[in-house]
Image (spheres, helix red, strand yellow):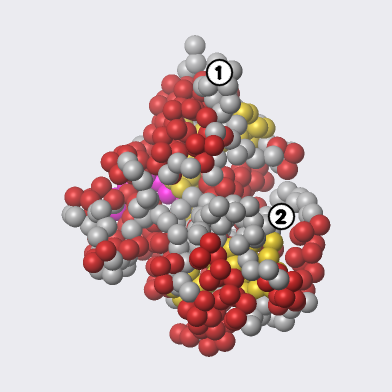
């Protein structure tokens, strides 16, 4: 601990909740190990510094001098993800370089390294080289989904892409067990730029001083081997992050949190279907109503997170039929937000209907909760295939086939029939997740190796 005192790790997360949360969790882990933490962040969707008093936060000024951050403009919210990443780069690439240079400073020897999101890896590479600081990357996806994303240019050359409807169920042998419909593509008007993003991520990761993963060896042994065979870079699978960082800093609860907990406390063990589709996806009103009636008709208690703006063209619940909420009674509860970690850990929760984002996936695995998988885009499709066919801890409910009757059947399959020993497999993976964090566990040892690796860096800060 003493050798880390005063040593600083600079971190740069992307301003998407699914990327920001694991970076903050990693920062907590580093801080608990004795490092000081500085977080560079955009002025768009930035964390509340008051929630993390041990960290130093530095806002990177955007390059639209005298105006608003372009990322906050109404037109930015309607962009596809590829276009948004391009705007992020245009808005922050040069300001990021200047901010990093100012943070490191002339002759600074306290800064150990920069940890950036892998999507920013190529831009971080040039900035880190300029100031003479070592650079690591955090990959916030699963190893399997990153390997699939990295393979997109190859899969395009082999005519898997663009995806053709008649091939959706065809096995992609290059990234088995994925099918064509599982490939982590994005809907975009700039497909060439998507492949360039994939290429930049690969190059940025491969040229870094190491890759950090929010996963553990027993969960993704084969994908980790695949990655190591293709990338000549040290890897550190030290997850699950939240199991190491959740007690390091206090969290505050509001009235809605207590109401949700009180409602869960009144339910029978493993009786509740928890439903949440993440922070980015949106759906049409027709889909929303199918979900509502499917949950209602299942006759199982449900806790449903409906994010404001989740339903296209509405603010929140306006699309529900008159009296729907009132007539749910104690059988259902609809909220705008929950503390997902607390909900998944509650004994009343028996299944998680999820979009299969990686954070949600690994959090559910850690609590032994079976999943109903309705992926929306990119890596979520890969995660869903692994949940259903590799780890066998959930069932698939495809978005294209989602109606109230199929929803009822899926809920019954997981909650009542428990087909194919899903719950037993969930408990087995939960135990493995716990074991990996023990003193002799793989994540514990990998974290020790990561700390030693960081302390071996000889940053020389060549700002003049």
Q: Secondary structure at mark 2?
A: loop
Question: Residue at left 28%, top 66%?
Answer: 168
x and y percent of residue 365 in the render?
55, 68
Give the answer, above or below, for where 240 lies relative to 94: below
Q: Is residue 131 visible?
A: yes
- For the point 49% across and 50% down, the residue is 140
- Please check the rendered image and state whether residue 232 is part of the magenta-colored stretch, yes or no: yes
Most extreme residue toward the left, as rendered?
Answer: 158
Horizontal and vertical percent for residue 105?
56, 19
User: Is-magenta flag for residue 455?
Assistant: no
89 is higher (above) or lower (below) than 401? above
Residue that extends furthest to the top in the rendered view of this protein:
464
The local crowd at label 2, few if under 14, some if 14 to 19, many if 20 or more residues have their Cα within 10 Å, is few
Secondary element at tag 1: loop
Is 336 rendered above or below residue 122?
A: below
CA gap, disc 2 to disc 1? 40 Å
Question: Which residue is found at the position 64% from the left and 59% from the top?
Answer: 318
In front: 21, or 446?
Answer: 21
Q: Residue tagged by mark 2?
A: 247
In this view, the mark in front (2 or 1): 1
- Boundaries of the magenta span: 229-236
Q: Viewed as shown, does residue 53 lie left or right of 20? A: right
Give the camera-side residue of 254 and 211: 254
Query: Where, by quadrant of the figure, is residue 260 drawn?
Result: bottom right
443 displayed left or right of 344? left
Res 442 visible: no
Hey, which residue is sitting farthest front in the picture? 322
Residue at the location (43% across, 44% down)?
A: 81
- The percent position of residue 29, horizontal first and vertical second, equals 62, 48
- Could you say which disc has been placed on residue 65 in the image? 1
Comes first in the chain, label 2 or label 1? 1
């Amino acid at each position: 601990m003493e050798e880390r005192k005063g040593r600083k790790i600079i971190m740069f997360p992307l301003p998407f909740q699914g990327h920001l949360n694991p970076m903050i969790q990693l920062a907590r882990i580093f801080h608990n190990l004795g490092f000081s933490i500085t977080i560079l962040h955009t002025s768009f969707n930035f964390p509340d510094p008051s929630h993390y008093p041990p960290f130093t936060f530095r806002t990177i000024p955007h390059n639209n001098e005298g105006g608003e951050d372009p990322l906050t403009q109404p037109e930015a919210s309607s962009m596809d993800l590829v276009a948004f990443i391009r705007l992020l780069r245009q808005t922050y690439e040069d300001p990021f370089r200047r901010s990093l240079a100012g943070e490191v400073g002339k002759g600074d020897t306290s800064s150990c390294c920069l940890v950036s999101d892998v999507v920013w890896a190529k831009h971080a590479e040039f900035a880190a080289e300029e100031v003479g600081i070592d650079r690591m990357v955090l990959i916030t996806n699963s190893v399997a989904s990153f390997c699939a994303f990295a393979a997109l240019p190859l899969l395009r050359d082999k005519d898997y892409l663009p995806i053709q409807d008649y091939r959706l169920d065809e096995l992609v042998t290059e990234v088995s067990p994925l099918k064509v419909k599982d490939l982590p593509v994005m809907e975009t008007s700039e497909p060439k730029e998507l492949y360039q993003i994939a290429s930049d991520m690969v190059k940025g990761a491969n040229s870094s001083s190491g890759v950090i993963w929010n996963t553990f060896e027993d969960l993704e042994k084969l994908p980790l081997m695949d990655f190591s065979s293709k990338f000549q870079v040290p890897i550190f699978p030290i997850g699950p992050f939240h199991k190491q960082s959740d007690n390091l800093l206090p969290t505050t609860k509001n009235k809605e949190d207590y109401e949700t907990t009180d409602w869960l406390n009144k339910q029978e063990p493993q009786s509740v279907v928890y439903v949440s589709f993440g922070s980015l996806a949106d759906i049409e009103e027709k889909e929303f109503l199918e979900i509502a009636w499917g949950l209602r008709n299942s006759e199982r208690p449900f806790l449903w997170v409906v994010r404001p703006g989740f339903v296209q063209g509405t603010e929140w619940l306006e699309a529900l039929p008159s009296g729907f909420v009132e007539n749910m009674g104690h059988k259902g509860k609809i909220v705008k937000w929950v503390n997902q970690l607390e909900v998944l850990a509650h004994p009343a929760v028996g299944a998680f209907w999820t979009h299969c984002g990686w954070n949600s996936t690994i959090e559910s695995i850690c609590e032994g909760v079976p999943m109903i998988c309705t992926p929306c885009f990119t890596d979520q499709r890969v995660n869903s295939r692994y949940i259903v066919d590799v780890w066998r801890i959930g069932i698939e409910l495809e978005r294209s086939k989602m109606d109230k009757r199929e929803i009822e059947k899926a809920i019954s399959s997981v909650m009542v029939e428990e087909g194919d020993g899903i719950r037993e497999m969930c408990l087995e993976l939960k135990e493995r997740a716990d074991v990996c964090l023990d003193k002799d566990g793989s994540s514990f040892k990998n974290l020790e190796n990561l700390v030693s690796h960081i302390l071996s860096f000889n940053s020389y800060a060549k700002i003049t």
